[in-house]
Image (spheres, rainbow, N blue to C red):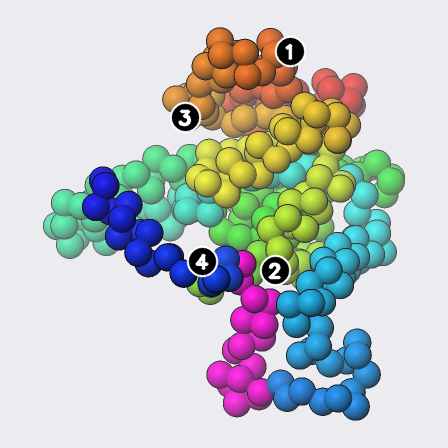
Amino acid sequence: MISLTIASMEQTQDITERRLADAWAELQSHSDQGKPLHPDAYRLAFADPEFLLRRETRGIRFQLELLKPDLDQSDAGIENTIVVFGSARFPAPEDADKALAVAQASGDAQAIADAHRGVRNAVYYDQARLFGQLVAQYSADKPAADRLYVATGGGPGIMEAANRGAHELGAATVGLNIALPHEQSANPYVTPSLSFKFHYFALRKMHFMMRAKALAAFPGGFGTLDELFEVITLVQTGKAKPVPIVLFGSDYWKRLLNFDVLLEAGAISPKDLDLFAYVDTPQDAWNYIAAFYKL
């Protein structure tokens, strides 16, 4: 473990190296495709991508990334969302079954074990899909101002499942995607005009909360934990109004997070455990949200 740590330190020992990705990398593909962006002193400032992507104009990009999705959602009448977080790695049942068949045909023991895990995780995909349908079903006959829309990170896995469920009932869905070093695009169930791409995680998380009337956190990894604790912290500290927060899959969350340790250490108050609830079915998740708002 020590040798691994030292090796990791050796790879990042330059203290002058920037730790945040430059926004310029977002448009590097233009150059790769033979379409370089050349500086032009005479170009209007707001039409000059090289100027807008300078380190010194980062604050302007923050503002733009906050404003664009806000205006577009307002124009579309999206004011109330149910935010669904969860793993991008959990496959749809049909994909999990295909992967298992391929693995079994290969005879590779590790591939078979991984495929069986995929089949188990696909149960959560199905449940997120059903939850998305419940949200869309509630909103179908409501006036525009009272409708609830499913909003996710826009990626695959649990995010895709929730968008898919709502989409299947004809509802518009929101996707707040993030530009990552590896290739990623919005899942096909996000409404195209409500599919937004972010460079900054912080601005993306702010947009999750700006319209959120509830949060459903399905099993996930670091990203899901980051998003979940952002919301819990905002509500706990009073920086955001209370919203129903459901942790879907009580066995997963109770094995992953022992909140009693925080309580016993005095790091949180007993009432903080009331900020969220464990649920195990899509209907229970919806019932909890509905009871909170007396829907």
Q: Is residue 185 above or below residue 289?
A: below
Identity, as a three-letter code, of the amino acid under mark 4: Ile
Residue denoted by label 1: 271
Look at the numbered discs 2 and 1 and tell me whether their residues touch, using CB distance below 8 Å.
no
- Reading the chain from its start, which is encountered first: label 4 or label 2? 4
Whether 26 is among the magenta residues is yes
* Distance between the alpha carbons at the discs numbered 4 and 2: 24 Å
Choose top left, top right, bottom left or bottom right for residue 266: top right
- On-image quarter of the N terminus: top left
| Mark 1 Cα shell of 10 Å, populated few (<14), some (14-19), many (≥20) | few
Question: Which is more toward the observer, 78 or 226?
Answer: 226
Tag of residue 199: 2
| Nearer to us: label 3 or label 2 | 2
Type of amino acid under label 2: His
Q: Residue at x 54, y 20 (%)?
A: 278
Q: Which residues are magenta?
A: 20-36
- The crowd level at tag 3 (other Cα within 10 Å; few <14, some 14-19, many 20+) is few
Q: Specify which label sits upstream in the sequence, 3 or 2.
A: 2
Rendered residue at 15%/54% (across/down): 106
* Residue 100 makes an appearance in the image: no
Task: Report, in whole angstroms, how far the alpha carbon at label 2 lies from the one at label 1.
Answer: 36 Å
Query: In the structure shown, which secondary structural element does the residue marked by tag 4 occupy?
Result: loop
Q: Nearer the viewer, mark 1 or mark 3?
A: 1
As measured in the structure, the alpha-carbon distance from the residue carrying label 1 to the one carrying label 3 is: 21 Å
